[in-house]
Image (cartoon, helix red, strand yellow):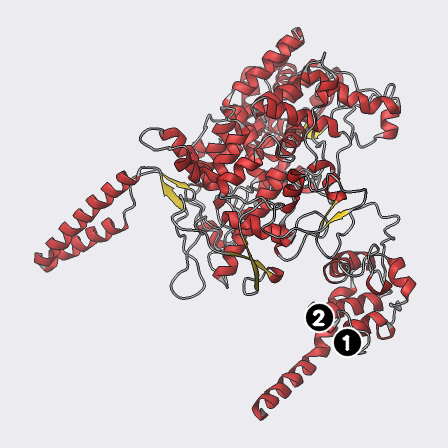
Amino acid sequence: MKRHRKNSDKLSYVWEFWRIPLLVFATTAWAGQPPEQFFEAKIRPLLIERCISCHSDKDPDGGLSLESKEGWAEREVISPGEPKQSLLIAAVRHQDSSLRMPPEDSGIERLSENEIQLLEHWIREGAVDPRSSQATHTGPKLRPRQFRITQQDTSHWAYQPIRDPSLKYVDKRPSEVVDQLIDDKLQPMGATRSPQASPRELVRRAYFDLWGLPPDSEAVITFQNDPSDAAWSLLIDKLLASPLYGQRWGRYWLDWVRYAETNGYERDGNKAGAWRYRDYVIDSLNRDKPYDRFLIEQLAGDLLIADENLSIEHTPERWKEAIIATGYYRLHVWDDEPDDTEAAELDDLDDIMVTTGAVVMGMTTGCNRCHDHKFDPLSQVDYYSMLDLFRDIDPYGLSKKGGGGRGTGRISTFLCSEQQLSDWRAEQHTRIEAIENKIASADESEKIALHEQLKQLREQQPPFDQALAVNPPAHSRKATFVLARGDYQSPQQQVSAAIPQLFGVLSHGHLQNAGEGDQVKPQAADSSSHIPMRNRLDFARWLTSPHHPLTARVLANRIWLNHFGSGIVPTADDFGYTGIAPKNEELLDHLATQLQRGGWSIKNLHRLIMHSQAYRMSSQAHPEGNSAAREHDPENSLFWRQNLRRLDAEAIRDSMLVYSGELTDKSSGPSVYSSLSAEIQETANPVSLSNWTTSPDDQQNCRSVYLVVKRSLKDPLLESFDFANSHSPVGQRPVTTVAPQALMLLNDRFVQKCSETIAKRLIQQSVDESPRIQQLWNLIYQREPTQDEQTVLTEFLQKQTEAQRSELSAWTSVVRSILNSNECLYVE
């Protein structure tokens, strides 16, 4: 006991010695933050996480609410500027035995010293709190501390059955119903849709939407001569039939599932065969594989093999697709040297859960790992019940001997039959055995060569293609427990695989007889409200069942978003309370209904949207006829006009290759490594550069979707134009306007090379300036230049010629300036 007290005294002395410097350091670090920013970054999350579950406006323990400024001001628990005089600080420091938060018998962990210091700093700086009371609060409300499914939950728009509004318009085609549903929202405000865009604008819009590439001037002229509905339909069919379509829309899916070909972290090692998953996605979209099948293959392809009796001998293509599709489970960021392999495995599963929830169901599930969702009807039990579905997946990496590192484990699969692999290994064993026998009788000079042969044989990989994949489970899944605060060392109740309780309540109609405002108490984990699932195949089929309220809605919204630049639901990955509800639910339900009714055909949904007059509207506001729309809906959330959209990073790069005539026809295979500038090589992580093997020049002019996606080292041109972050799902890329974008288009070596190639073609095709300008306009803008444009460009060309004293350099500057123009970079 004496020794323990002595050590304790030492620790106390060390803490007191460092306490004041640490407080000074913390205060200094926070001192420069504006009070509102400090509150939003530090205090609001702390109150939500630690306090508001008990002290909310709706159900305030002790009559104290910390959900709004009015709540704590009314109870006078905070004295702005004086933390020592504030009852809140006294309570969280347990200075008074009669006033302790949280109470000692509550089972809730006390606030840490760092958390208390945050509160003290906030109060010392004036306790700035921009929140208002719940009476005026328009955002989502926190859930009750005790989790339960409420009447409000089952009434939330996204969880309602999908209803077909076209039944009201039996005399209209599906595309006409789209227009009618938009008109129904505009008419009460006296607004109308914008007129149709010009034929040229429509052709450019269709090409960039479906191919991500510009049309040639001939395609524009053809449609200008015949802009009929029949011609428009033929154009859409032509674009959808091309393999270029899958290359465009496959990239969207890769954004959503955070596709990359490396693991991330310091070493950022390669994911063997990841490109096969990319090719699978592109090929599936080009063949218009039904979306339900597309999902099932990715979530449970390894289980489909047994369920549908697939084999490489009898159904080779379907067998390979089912295996390659499960590469979905290997796309996440992966730490090859974690501090704790058990925690790292749960991190991997959490990443899969978060991605699947967001991409397929539009649900946010990440916070449920540690606690019940603060807003949506998802409990911590729901989270671990769903996570149990994925416990049969072979972990991405297996433990290494010694240390906390993880090897690559069984992360890939040979695309051959078990018999073929077994035969090869038997032959290999025979070869190795023969050499070992030779070594036994060989002289010393021969042994060196034989040992080298033996080494090479043992290191030799089977001569079969490999794909990033999961294998059919050879073991039962691990037991899954609810983990207190997400800590695997604090297991609580055991759970079994099931879908969230909410969907069981909806399915079984537990609330049919509930009164307005009634609440339903939570059901036990094994009750009828938790629908059990045997495995991932059951789960995938449940997701794609016709009665699921989310899957079809989420996909339909994503397709609309990428045709209009904005979703019917603006928050593509969040259909819950923290997302933004649609202003036209019927429009979304119409699209979802048609998607399911059309056999989950994504191409048919493209046709439906693009045949509508709404899609063909001008992006101009047309002030003479749309004053009401501009007044009542300035954000265009009701889609009374099209949206002006900037091209994404890949379309910008690929278009330059089209204009220069350098785009290759690569459509599959291993990814291409682009050239990196000297500046990038000098500043990049040497470890990242170590496995960057620059591809030959003649391979680098492929479409951007075939460039390698390395998490720690991105193509500078693509990154400057908001290329997707591959660490998490990206439902919609941000569209930024920053100075480096213009600088990149003016100075980047790739842009310079394309500009020079175009300039050479112009010089070779014509001697005079005027025809060259016309050719340049037709090439990039697909139209003739105006007289003013001719004049301005001629003057600019003369100045460039005088300054650079080279015709090629002058024309290269001209081309580069055109590539930097809004008309080149935006789609009307």
Q: Which residue is drawn at 71% across and 16% down?
A: 176
In the rendered image, the quadrant that contains the C terminus is top right
Asked if residue 218 shows in the view, the reply is: no
Q: What residue type is labelled 2?
A: Arg
Earlier-in-chain disc, 1 versus 2 = 1
The residue that mark 1 highlights is 94
- Res 209 quadrant in image: top right
Height in image: 702 above or below 21? above
Q: Residue at x 61, y 16 (%)?
A: 775
Height in image: 393 above or below 35? above
Q: Is mark 1 on a helix, strand or loop?
A: loop
- Which residue is at the front of the view, 762 or 24? 24
The residue that mark 2 highlights is 110
Give yes or no for contact between labels 1 and 2 (Cβ–Cβ under 8 Å).
yes
Asked if residue 503 shows in the view, the reply is: yes
Using a 10 Å C-alpha cutoff, classify the residue at mark 1 as few (fewer than 14 neighbours), some (14 to 19) or many (20 or more): some
Q: Position of residue 687 (x, y in %)?
A: 47, 54
Q: Position of residue 791 (x, y in %)?
A: 73, 19
In this picture, residue 824 sits left or right of residue 462: right
> Which residue is farthest top?
225
